[in-house]
Image: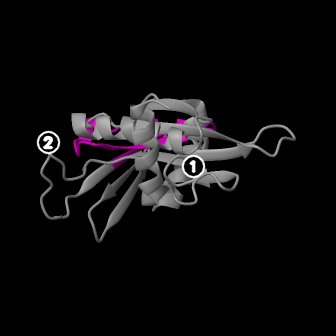
């Protein structure tokens, strides 16, 4: 075995997040899907790495490295999928009832996160029977679209606005979120 694979394998075995990974069929929160293919007892895996619109180079690089590390940990069996914010695959979207895009981020070498201070936000819900996406949008009246549903989150008060052209799926998803 060549040295880089050995290092990645050693690193993977020391990663606490991977303990118990891929042992049972089902969705695991850090985006691993394990399943049986046909009547075989061997598990198959789909590993998705999601890249946000505002991801920094260190976040992107770490996500790619960790994906390769998990692939090695699971015996190079997983199929790897790269997901990009706003262009997620149908398979990835099927794992979640609603994909929510919110502003924020994690402290990193490229981004400093200040202590939390509540900022009101406007959440936009758009979709159909195949899935509803929630995106945080600027709190500007001109951004409202009468074919969608919105939540104005003021912290202790929440307002829901259903555009007259909104659909059942958007309104149902918003009710679940509120």
Indicate which disc residue 110 carries. Answer: 2
Whichever of callouts 1 and 2 sits on the residue coming sooner in the sequence is: 1
Residue at 81% of width from left, 46% of height from top?
A: 41
Q: Nearer the viewer, residue 153 or 50?
A: 50
Percent x, y for residue 30?
Answer: 48, 51
* Mark 1 vs mark 2, CA separation in Å: 32 Å
Q: Is residue 148 visible?
A: no
Residue at 57% of width from left, 53% of height from top?
A: 172
Percent x, y for residue 156?
Answer: 29, 71
Q: Residue furthest right?
A: 39
Q: Residues within 10 Å of mark 2 (few under 14, many from 20)?
A: few
Residue at 35% of width from left, 64% of height from top?
A: 158
Q: Residue furthest bottom?
A: 156
Q: How many marks?
A: 2
Residue at 44% of width from left, 60% of height from top?
A: 16
Answer whether residue 140 is magenta in the image. yes
Q: Nearer the viewer, residue 157 or 2?
A: 2
Percent x, y for residue 101?
Answer: 37, 44
Residue to which mark 1 is pinned: 97
Of circles 1 and 2, the one toward us is 2
Specify the quadrant that holds the C terminus: bottom left
Label 1 sits on a secondary structure element that is loop
Percent x, y for residue 164?
Answer: 48, 41
Q: Image quarter for residue 56?
A: top left
Q: Is residue 114 visible?
A: yes
Q: Residues within 10 Å of mark 1 (few under 14, many from 20)?
A: few
Segment tinted magenta in the rendering: 123-148
Indicate which disc residue 37 carries. Answer: none
CB contact under 8 Å: marks 1 and 2: no
Answer whether residue 129 is magenta in the image. yes
Residue 61 is left or right of residue 26, and the answer is left
């Amino acid at each position: 075995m060549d040295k880089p694979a050995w290092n990645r394998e050693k690193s993977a075995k020391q990663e606490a997040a991977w303990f118990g990974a891929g042992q049972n069929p089902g969705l695991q929160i850090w985006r691993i899907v394990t399943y049986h293919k046909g009547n075989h007892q061997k598990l198959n895996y789909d590993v998705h790495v999601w890249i946000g619109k505002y991801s920094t180079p260190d976040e992107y690089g770490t996500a790619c490295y960790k994906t390769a590390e998990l692939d090695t940990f699971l015996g190079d069996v997983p199929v790897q999928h790269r997901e990009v914010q706003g262009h997620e695959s149908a398979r990835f979207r099927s794992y979640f009832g609603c994909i929510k895009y919110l502003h924020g981020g994690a402290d990193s070498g490229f981004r400093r996160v200040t202590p939390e201070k509540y900022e009101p936000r406007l959440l936009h819900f758009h979709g159909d029977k195949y899935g509803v996406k929630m995106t945080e949008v600027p709190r500007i009246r001109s951004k409202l679209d009468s074919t969608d549903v919105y939540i104005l989150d003021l912290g202790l008060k929440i307002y829901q606005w259903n555009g007259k052209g909104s659909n059942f799926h958007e309104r149902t998803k918003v009710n679940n979120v509120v």
